[in-house]
Amino acid sequence: MPDAFTADDYAHRMQLAATVAADAGFAGLVITPGPDLVHLCGYAPPAVTERLTALVLAPGRQPTLVVPRLEQPDAAKATGAPALAMVEWLDGSDPYASTASLLDGHGRYAIADSAWALHLLGLQRALPGTTYVSLSDGLPMLRAVKDERELARLAAAGAGADASFVDILATRFAGRTEEEVADELAALLRRHGHSQVDFTIVASGPNGANPHHQAGSRTIQPGDPVVLDFGGLRDGYGSDTTRTVSVGEPADEVRTVYEIVRRAQQAAFEAVRPGVPCQEIDRVARRDIVEAGYGEYFIHRVGHGIGLTTHEPPYLVEGEEQPLLPGMCFSIEPGIYLPGRFGVRIEDIVTVTEDGGRRLNNTTREMQTVA
């Protein structure tokens, strides 16, 4: 198991977040339950309810957690708790008044994307002079660069997904429903260390032309290409990989399309290095597919960041000029989707190194046949 995060790790993250917020012109941050709260102080409330819990960070001030009194004992056990001041509130009192005392009445704050409208409106009512910007808009790179402990967790999650793919290759596909294969894939992810399975896309034959197809009752047939896209959380960090297999020998066009996607995925990986704009990775993958005549059938961005959640910044998409930085982790997943016929996608999680990129998924990218 990867090394545990320490109280010092969380104290550093909170201090850095407050500094980054100030540099971006914010008075501070308001972080409600969700991945940002876990990242910054290690606290995940036992249940996310209408009761306000909020971490307030501002430069030059001690990080402060506003927490319902009945949940304070759990909050005090969080690894980052030693760095926190805590403001408790009781049912029947006004949690927004308690939080307002920690805020600049005319400040501009970055607020967690996970904040409930109920809580944001309550803060605005208590301090009508304050303004709020979603964290993904105001500070999109806050969690984008992973430290060594985070990279170790992402690598372990990737290894668990890889092992699950190897195992599923040995099972029978033909004659089973997509749902049956998806259930087995979910069980394999758990067997290989995942505590949470977020998705198991099994898209056979014409269903493969839908990138986010939900596994259904279709019976998989001999000759079908099958898109397998699966992932979840292991040690709190995400996995996400896609491979396309063929039930028996693939048709010539399937093999041709597969090879185009494989080359595009490889080219995009080879383009990864510090300083390259995110959009360039999308462009490199798309260039190969467009030149092969399938550009209109590549219908999504080439990648998304991954960490505590399976989709987060950075996004590898046209228009995103953010340069790649060492420690960023994201998917590279070009695809071609031919409506009513079949689809092909190949996806790896990649991290940026000091001089290039490193894959966190290492199963073969050559087409595999299954029974």
Image (cartoon, rainbow, N blue to C red):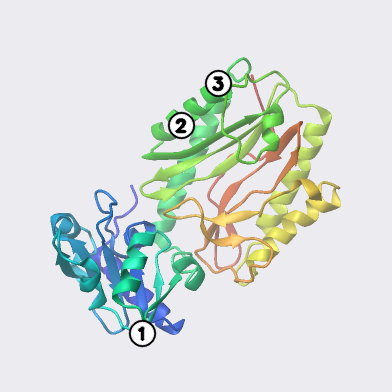
- Vertical relation: 73 (above or below) 135: above
- Nearer-N-terminus badge (1/3): 1
Dot 1 and dot 2 residues touching (CB under 8 Å): no
Residue that carries the numbered disc 3 in the rendered image: 171
Name of the residue lying farthest toward the top: 175
6 and 135: which one is in front?
135
State the separation of the CA atoms marked 1 and 2: 49 Å
- Nearer-N-terminus badge (1/2): 1
Q: Amino acid at mark 1?
A: His
- In this view of the protein, can residue 12 be seen by the observer? no
- Nearer-N-terminus badge (3/2): 3
State the separation of the CA atoms marked 1 and 3: 61 Å
216 and 255: which one is in front?
216
Q: Residues within 10 Å of mark 3 (few under 14, many from 20)?
A: few
Residue at point 86% right, 47% down?
A: 293
Q: Amino acid at mark 2?
A: Ala
Looking at the rendered structure, the number of numbered marks drawn on it comes to 3
Q: Residues within 10 Å of mark 1 (few under 14, many from 20)?
A: few
Query: Residue 312: where, in percent of width, then height?
Result: 50, 58
- Vertical relation: 363 (above or below) 91: above
218 and 359: which one is in front?
218
Task: Give me the disc on residue 186.
Answer: 2
State the separation of the CA atoms marked 3 and 2: 14 Å
Q: Amino acid at mark 3?
A: Thr
Task: Give me the disc on residue 106.
Answer: 1
Dot 1 and dot 3 residues touching (CB under 8 Å): no
Left or right? Give the position of 267 relative to 148: right
